[in-house]
Image (spheres, helix red, strand yellow):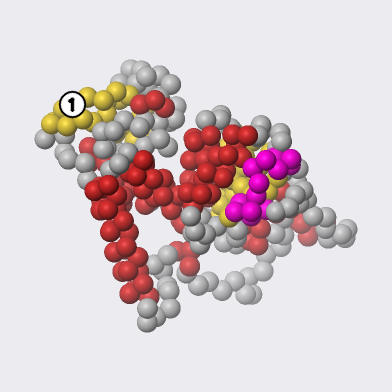
Amino acid sequence: MQRNIIRIDEDKCNGCGVCVPSCHEGAIKVVNGKARLTGDVLCDGLGACLKECPQGAITIETREADEYNEIEALKNIMQEGPAAVQGHLKHLEDHHQMEYLRQAQAYLKTKEAAMNDKHQDKPMACGCPGSMTQDFRGQAKASPAAALATEPVTSELRQWPIQLRLLNPNAPFFKDAELLVSADCVPFTFADFHRKFLKDKVLVMFCPKLDEDLDAYVEKLAEIFRVNAIRSVTILRMEVPCCGGTVQIVEEAVRRSGKGIVLKERTISLRGDILD
């Protein structure tokens, strides 16, 4: 069928990747140093990515292309975590794509019902890797902080509250701050959290899987970024896939804020190791 779809000029594209988070269907990836449309069925042709490209490499053209498929696009974006899904639904609502929005909501309800049926009469196993039961007893690990145990351990916490839902974007401690955005589980898993990560930083915490209204989290963070001169953001996430939403929420908030904030990401294993 003939329809509108994006075109990426490889001669102009420098592979900066700015367009990637602006595509709410996850249709654009950087491959071999160039932005690529990964599938016609994933591109709705609305062109939300156009204004994000600093090189002017993305345009809309009319050509023969497979029809946009909302369910395939939703499946694709679900791999990026709950914040990306919420961003996709909001994108559909903002652009008055109500039929696609109904399809997406119906599919998500079906998936939720299937998961509930699957686990109704038996304990949750590997359906969600982050919920799989593991027993670490008898496998104790020495902490790098053990060498400092001869002296009282000092808290490096610099402010209150710390939960994103409770934070005021205009709080004075955000001025010229270095932010530490952490998934809730990280401080309990990484024994030297205060000394290694929290020192001299302002802490923001939430859970990308269990907390509700993640789009409100994106907006709260975006407002913090907009009204303050944030110097840098370090993101701490767990290795389980659902914790990838921590990164997605921060990246989307930075995009909405319009700020060029330096982001650093660290992943913590279930045994408390830094994986990257």
**Residue at point 13% right, 31% down?**
2
On the image, the x and y values in percent for residue 141 come to: 67, 64
| Residue located 83% across and 55% down the image | 154
Q: Work out whether residue 39 can be spotted.
A: no
**Mark 1 belongs to which amino acid?**
Thr
- The residue lying at 57 percent from left, 43 percent from top is 221
**Residue at the extreme right:** 151
Residue 59 to residue 116: above or below: above
Range shown magenta: 162-174
Question: In the rendering, at what x and y percent does residue 85 appear?
Answer: 39, 50
32 shown above or below 223: above
* The stretch drawn in magenta includes residue 154: no
> For residue 17, which quarter of the picture?
top left
Q: Which residue is identified by label 1?
A: 62
On screen, residue 137 versus residue 45, left or right, reads: right
**Horizontal side, residue 267 vs residue 131: left or right:** right
